[in-house]
Amino acid sequence: MTEKSEATQVQVEGLVKKLDKLRSEIHKVIVGQEETVEQLIVAFIAGGHVLIEGVPGLAKTLMVRTLARAVNLSFKRIQFTPDLMPSDIIGTEILEETHNTKQFVFQKGPIFANLVLADEINRTPPKTQSALLEAMQEFEVTYFGKTHYLDRPFFLLATQNPIEQSGTFPLPEAQQDRFLFLIRIGYPNQEEEDHILKQTTGSSTADVQPVISGEEIIELQQWVRQVVISDELIHYVGQLVRNTRPADSVIPEIRDYVSWGAGPRAGQAIILTAKARALLNGRYSVIPEDLKQVAHPTLRHRILVNFKAEADGINSDDLINILLNKIEL
């Protein structure tokens, strides 16, 4: 190994250790949820966005706030409501008077932050939901023909409650596809719940410290793309994605229960997040376990099940399990 490559490895290892510190800082507040926290960090260093789904009271918002406190970056929270307008998110022009002259000046909205929490995103109409699309994909906002660039890194985390239907507007499939991960948060076990009750009803509060900077996150995002993946594993990912589509699938359950399968963006998401997971675990090449661990959060919102599946109690996670069992590596 050359002196330069040894120095590079030491640099990367130092950055990965900071991710371990980031995980520890989050767990000062968040009890359990190890897999969820790992997926959150994986998506962050992969440079994508996350949709978090769970019933009320499972600390979805708290988890995002804690991540923001542990990263030395700007943070904004947007509470989505039925009367929220696109200008409330991206900003608007205001008339400003200086030195006896009047001119319109663009007032930036809360989308102009490094970490943005879109809380209860399904409580606002599609017109307002779609205001996030350009920022998510292009990392910029266009207002009256003028482009305003977002600061990097830019990480959008949206939460939604899956059990309420009244007064909600489900995200269109095309917008769901822009999220790298759909993370589903479940109930804690007995031991975790006891810990939560003890921790949140006393007088002590956790002291969360920032442990990683925006420049280091950007550097990690660049290193993620240099993680190696074999052609064999790339072919496996292609097989997984193609077999989510009823017309192409060799799996009977997919043909019976799926209306629309995943597009090429799903394969890109699997490979990129598998690389991020490998780096998070101190490896510089992807292994099959990485791909299998990111399959559910990358595919579950990109597989649209039909009425027959709903009637039989089959959801996208069940179909992903079938895919992983039947598609051989």
Image (cartoon, grey):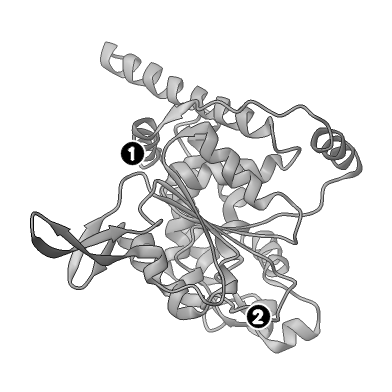
Q: Is residue 117 above or below residue 248?
A: above
Tell me residue 295's x, y (percent). 59, 56
**Residue receiving disc 2:** 167
Labels 1 & 2 near each other (Cβ < 8 A): no
97 lies left or right of 170: left
Relative to the observer, which residue lies in front, 327 or 198?
198
Q: Quadrant of residue 258?
A: bottom right
Tell me residue 312's x, y (percent). 81, 82
Q: Secondary structure at mark 2?
A: loop
Q: Secondary structure at mark 1?
A: helix
240 lies left or right of 105: right
Instruction: Determine which of the numbered discs, if any, sits on residue 222 in the image.
Output: 1
Q: Quadrant of residue 226?
A: top left
Tell me residue 266's x, y (percent). 48, 63
Q: Amino acid at mark 1?
A: Gln
Relative to the observer, which residue lies in front, 202 or 182?
202
230 lies left or right of 79: left
The residue at 38%/35% (across/down) is 214
Q: Quadrant of the N terminus?
A: top left
The residue at 57%/64% (across/down) is 299
Point out the frontmost of discs 1 and 2.
2
* N-term mark: 1 or 2: 2
